[in-house]
Image: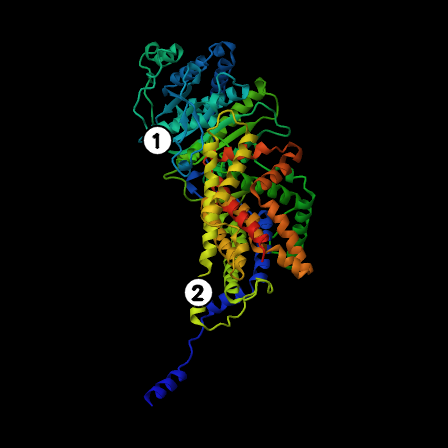
Amino acid sequence: MAETKEKSLSDKKPKPRVRPIVRLGIFLISHSFHVSVVCCTAGVLALFLLPVLAKNTYISENALMPGSASPMLSNQHVSDGNRLVKDLTNPNSKSSETGIESHKIIAQYMLDLGAEVSFHKFHPQMNQFHPLHFFSSPDSGKIQENYSCSSYGINTVGIIRAPRGDGKEAIVLVTPYNALKSGFGEALSLGIAYSVFSLLTQVTWLAKDIIWLVADSQYGEYAAVAAWLREYQTPKFSSLSTPNAEMCPDVNNLFELKGHSISGSKFSNSFRRAGTMAAALVLKVRDQNEQFEDTISIYAEASNGQMPNLDLINVVNYLAVHRQGLRVNVEKLWSLLNSSWLKSLGEIFESLAKVAKSLYPKWKFGIPATEYVEGTATLASSLYYQALGVPTGPHGAFRDYQVDAITLEISPKFSLDKVWRNDILLRGGRLIEGVIRSVNNLLEKFHQSFFLYLLTSPSKFVSVGVYMIAFALLIAPLPMVAASLYVDANSSSNCSKGDSSTPSAITDTDEHSIAIRSWRWLNSAKLVFIVHLWGAIVSLLPYFISQIPDCSPTTSFMIWVLLSILSLLTLNSVLASPLACAKATQEKEWALVKSVTISSVFIGLGLMSVINFATAEIGALLMVPMCLLAQPLKLDVRAGTLRSFCRMICNLVLGHIAFPPAAFFLLKGMLDGFGNANVGDFWMWVESLWAWNSATYLFIGMVQLPCWVLCISILFHTC
């Protein structure tokens, strides 16, 4: 009696209410197909809207105050720079095979200004793939074993101590210079730097030390700057003139030259240092003439998509345009400028903006079609170079040490005769002076403005809060579709029954059978794990292939492909086959594999967005549609509907495009033409990625390639 009473009381208890967030989750999972279509369409549309949503740049740090003071660089400083240019272009300065005469001239000019001068001798380092060097310190190169006098690089360094500083901060000015093959543009960049250097030795407002680094670029501009930074940040406490000095008398004389010739000289054989680097500028002058007007190109991308603080670019842009009358240029994908479909899209946005303005005049939406095309080309270039993860100039070496740096390349309109040479020296020098003066005003490091941004023009940018919306919309359907597939695979009893986008109701009430079915995903997780393990092996294979001597890029690529296939077959026989879904006795095994695959892709894209957003965005554009649409082709053939036929065609097209080598050749063909494509080009491209420790290489090998293999296995599943 008591038991029946308790049972009746328990029956009268109200059932717990389902929370709204749970209801929303159930609704999204049950309508995952429609949510996927809406989110992916909105994500692509948001990506094309980024040039329209770009904001004008502004100076966030008030202490910078660009252009607040009149420039002090005079014609006298320009004439001093001209003298250095003439001496460096004199044939006598290049008489030595090692170019030491040029280094002596530069050091002498620095000493005449009262600067502290030293030489930094370094050996070139070979960038070589090593799996443990990703995300490690920048000093991961391998020094060549056979030394000769010509294998040494010599950086000339001059330091001005700030009269109002305490020696704890410094600003670095870098001018790459190859004494053996120097053009007139390199000499002119040294002339601009020297004119500014001579001015800064006389001013009283300087609060930060100035370091002028003349980087020996005979082994590459980046290598020279990186070698000096390694010594600056991680000293080795070794003499610079001891190794192989008896074999290189010219180099030995270089280190002993000035100590005896000038009384009270500030020349030193030891490595000189200043304070913590607040910012760095790399100055270059092109030998080719610009077609329209004097321009200055800004290169900001560093390793793994790192960018300097936007305020540094804003200061250069403001001073160049509003003070020196220079046209500022950032890199563009020129092939997009003549794109007809992009121009049509810009005209559509322009028309929509006019309609919106007629409805509400205060709503400022839209830009002209020509500006949209140019902004899209600039945005695509910014995405591309950030996604590569390879620095676009020697400034990238500074970003490895968290120092804000950019490369400025001046392109004069006219030939560099005497008149226009003085004009470039004056305007370029005043620009550098203004930037140094602004950075000199900083009381702390750059922190006010953005570090995560995409440029659409020198004066417009897209912040992280805007461009992440497009990425979030693209990957938002992945967890919902994964949950929908999991529920559908555990509740369905017929492999060929219906579409996988809508979960069925669970009819089996047996708790034991439900528990068994709920753990079926572990088998699929094992298969997905094995394929990702194979991706890791494929990523490590180039380390061993690169050890093969005299191996051409085409041969290396073919060896890589053969070893990758062999390793996949080995894992198939030893552990479990990634293609074992065809032999599985469980129902809808392909749906569980797809669910786990989508989950792993979601995790991989999320992690990559933290490391390099541009790589994650491009990867999402390639992988998300392929993952969402993947379904066995046999099911589409059996269905025989127009929808299934369209999905089958899309799966085959996406399967070709998402394959990493195919995606590379497609992009290369769009940029350079399909006639120039070569099989060995992909190996050389991948080689450049691992040489620069780009995280994009790991993403391709450990996320994109395994995802592609799993999706192909789903397509050819014999359900």
Residue ID at (52%, 17%): 181
- Quarter occupied by the C terminus: bottom right
* Residue farthest along the bottom direction in this orientation: 1
Q: Say whether residue 316 is visible.
A: yes
Q: Quadrant of the N terminus?
A: bottom left
Residue drawn at x 46%, y 10% is 96
Q: Which mark is residue 465?
A: none
Distance in Å between CA atoms under marks 1 and 2: 58 Å
| Mark 1 and mark 2 residues within 8 Å of each other at the beta carbon | no
Q: Which residue is mark 1?
A: 233
Residue 526 vs 211, above or below: the answer is below
Residue underneath mark 2:
516
Return the x and y of residue 442 as percentages of the image width and height: 39, 38
Please, what is the three-letter code of the amino acid marked with disc 1?
Answer: Gln
Q: Nearer the viewer, residue 677 or 2?
A: 2
- Where is residue 79 shown, x and y percent of the image? 49, 18
- Quarter of the image holding residue 288? top right
Instruction: Name the outermost residue toward the left.
Output: 237
Q: Residues within 10 Å of mark 1 (few under 14, many from 20)?
A: few
Considering only vertical position in the picture, is 79 above or below 716?
above
Q: Earlier in the sequence, mark 1 or mark 2?
A: 1
Q: Is label 2 in a helix, a strand or a loop?
A: helix
